Amino acid sequence: MRTIALFTGVIICGLSVGAYAATEVIHQQGRVFSSESISVKKGEAVTFLNDDTVPHNIMSASKGNEFNLGSQAPGTSTDVSFKEAGDVQVICAIHPRMKMMVKVTN
Amino acid sequence: MPVRGSYRSTAFLATIASAGLCVLGFSTIGFGAAVVGESRKVEITQKATGGLDALKAQYRRPTTIPFPKDDPYTPEKAALGKKLYFDTRLSVSSAQSCASCHSPGFGWGDGLAVGVGHGMAKLGRHSPTIVNAAWSAIFMWDGRLPTLEEQALGPIQSPGEMNMKLDDLLARLSSISEYKPLFDAAFPGEGMKAKTLAQAIATYERTVVSERAPFDAWIDGNEKAIPEDAKRGFAVFNGKAQCAACHEGWNFTNEGFQDIGLPSKDVGRGEYLPGVIKMQHAFKTPGLREIGRRSPYMHDGSLATLEQVIDHYDHAGVDRPSRSDLMRPLELTAQEKADLVAFLKTLTSELSPTAVPVLPR
Ligand SMILES: [Cu+2]
């Protein structure tokens, strides 16, 4: 339920900011990502926001789009943009249940 | 008793899929292809916690066991799996079974600091319990196996453990005439093979669930079920000591990996994620059910009592770059430590005895 609520929140937020909101925000409350899968354009930023109570490690080993945020403290956010089109599996190395797909399009 | 099917088997499969990705292929990657911006502080409005009742609701026991869609529960499969689990002929020496290291007598562990493998040689790590493995997202202390089915075959084949080649094992089981009809009944049209052997053992293991403990009666509303010091301990567990940051939910684990600062050379999960500093010396957070029967504690079995475990967390262990950011000196009082121990003791049930199965001949 919380996931759905947060996801809805992200959509509403995006709409209200209007056409200039090129940035997707992924929340991390309750050891889950707020979306299981999102779609972004190549070069467009995704904001990973740790609004949880514990540190997370957000990373991807997907070819061409590897990144690793190290230990992301609660109350911090980091923007990530992707260079290559394709499916990017994003995980938290600390919490194996945290995983999502970012579809990067041309 | 297990319930057929699963309300969450889809989630379970998704977990397996991603855990698979996770285990494969991380050892050779370089980072930095995506463009990562600066981290910045963000104002977060933490939602109200909702008090003790809301907190207790997070610890309510599930009513069914999750079984994966591709290995659903059947009584025939679980019964066959139980025979295999207790059968010492699964090891090359015919002296060790799964139950040797994961024994019902020791809370489904072995009561030793580190396991004992083939030829009585000591293993590198403490034998973890299999209690509540049905809810696990990832297996082994270092998370190297993504499913319970794969886990079942791991120790059988490992040279240091049961040291049994699968082909040899299938030949041996085929020579035991009473096994064939059991496999045929459990796996119609499939019979005996490595896959069904693994599925039977995993299915049995999923039925090994911690029983109702005093804590569960308290969660369900019986205020007299646990003593007052345990209730205070529950508050410390969720508050000052921050234990619940990792030991969360009814099974007291989020399946996560943390370096908790034990002075051991073992890099744990770091072997599979060499590029991730926080995974060096990181091990899977174990659940705490039946904890009173599971000493000694930690991945290396280095701490003998719950009091020592709490002292370790209080001191925060070895400070090194990989150590979890959650590990910091807690400055717990003697009373708080005693209350935590009192609370942990309420997580142990009066486990009913497990009947050892009559084995096929
Ligand atoms: Cu995480």
Image: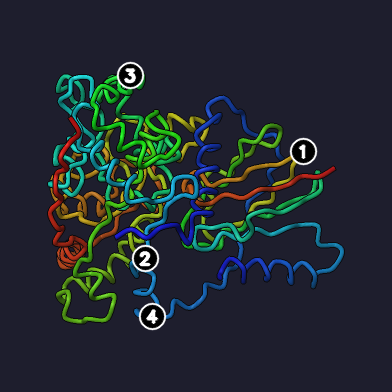
Q: Are marks 2 and 3 in contact (CB under 8 Å)?
A: no
Q: Earlier in the sequence, mark 2 or mark 3?
A: 2
Is residue B300 in sight in this rendering? no
* Residue assigned mark 4: B51
The quarter in which the C terminus of chain B is drawn is: top left
The kind of residue tagged 2 is Pro
Residue drawn at point x = 25 percent, y = 54 percent: B314
Give neighbour class at mark 4: few <14, some 14-19, many 20+ (Cα, 10 Å).
few
Marks 1/2: CA distance?
43 Å
Give the image location of residue A85, x and y in percent.
Answer: 78, 39
Q: Earlier in the sequence, mark 3 or mark 4?
A: 4
Looking at the rendering, which quadrant does residue B139 occupy? top left
Marks 1/4: CA distance?
45 Å
Judge if badges 3 and 4 mark residues of a common chain.
yes
The quarter in which the N terminus of chain B is drawn is: bottom left
The kind of residue tagged 4 is Gly
Relative depth, front residue between B60 and A8: B60
Give the image location of residue A66, x and y in percent.
Answer: 65, 36
Marks 2/3: CA distance?
37 Å
Q: Secondary structure at mark 3?
A: loop
Left/right of residue B16 with respect to residue A40 in the rendered view: left
Residue drawn at point x = 59 percent, y = 40 percent: A68
Give the image location of residue A72, x and y in percent.
Answer: 54, 51
* Residue assigned mark 2: B62
Q: Chain of mark 4?
A: B
**Which disc number belongs to residue A23?**
none
Q: Secondary structure at mark 1?
A: loop
Marks 4/2: CA distance?
22 Å
* Residue assigned mark 3: B165
Left/right of residue B24 with respect to residue B151 in the rendered view: right
